[in-house]
Amino acid sequence: MALLSGTGGNATTASGAPGGTGGKVPTLTERDFEQAVLRSELPVLIEFTADWCAPCKKIAPEVEAFAEEMRGKANVVKVDIDRAPALARELRVKSVPTFMVFAEQRITDVAVGAISKKKMREMVEPFLARAEGALKPNELAQLVREGTAIAVDTRDEAAFKRAHIPGAAHMALEEIENRLAELHMFQARPVLYCRAGDKTKDLATRLNDQGLPVAFLEGGLLAWESEALPIERT
């Protein structure tokens, strides 16, 4: 597939304003495609859309929310098939909305029709850079089943007592840096988690930068619950 080879140039949007957007998500022209997609160092999710597409308008908030969530991790763009018909034909886009992921200079996934933000993430996630020590919920669940990891809940004690990962230990986030020896005395690999994953990610990054390897759960307890994994409640 030629993919409009040789059409690169400074990235502009369909409106003609460099870096502008039709909303929060940039709309590419055929001239933009090589520079903005094929040469991107980040994975790119493209929504092929049209002004007359009702489902496209309905899911626009989901697409914009996902674009914001992926800022700095992946690029999210739109292509209007009426303004870029040659591109739509070359990529064999038959209907809108169609979502397409480009990573490593090739198409890696395609979904036709309106999709959820969760599905967008599933399409892009295999190509996202991962922080050192990061574990996905299903990865942690497997390690816990094997007995090679133990979840460590870093939220406050009241939150831990209300609901936590089965078998998890509790160690408040603000105490961990003073209890590292204790942390590594667990019989299995400790994996920290908080509510949304952001706090334990920051801590793990800081400790890994100091040469102290610490694992954490990406997305925290919310990500664990979103995968319908078991929760222990009291």
Image: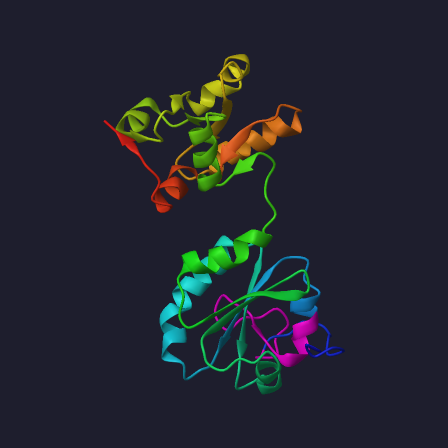
- Residue 155 coordinates in the image, percent (x, y): 38, 28
211 and 103: which one is in front? 103
Residue 167 sits above or below residue 82 on the image: above
Question: Can I make out residue 72 in this image?
Answer: no
Residue 110, image x and y in percent? 52, 68
Q: Is residue 169 left or right of residue 183?
A: left
Q: Main secondary structure of the magenta part?
A: loop
Viewer-side residue, 75 vs 122: 122
Q: Is residue 36 left or right of residue 53?
A: right
Quadrant where the N terminus sits is bottom right
Tell me the residue at 44%/29% (across/down). Answer: 144
Rendered image quadrant of residue 76? bottom right
Which residue, as the protein is rendered here, is positioned at the far right?
Answer: 6
User: Which residue is farthest left?
Assistant: 234
Q: Report the residue at 56% width, 30% height from top.
A: 204
Q: In the figure, residue 28 lies in which quadrant?
A: bottom right
Assess whether residue 144 is covered by the magenta stretch.
no
The residue located at (45%, 64%) in the rendering is 63
Depth check: 137 or 44 in front? 137
Vertical side of 169 occupied by 231: above or below = below
Image coordinates of residue 90 in percent, x first then y, are: 62, 82
31 within the magenta span: yes
Placement of the C terminus among the 4 image quadrants:
top left
Where is 124 relative to 100, above or below? Answer: above
**Residue at (68, 67) in percent of width and height:** 38
Residue 189 image point, x, y percent? 52, 24
State which region is magenta.
Answer: 14-34
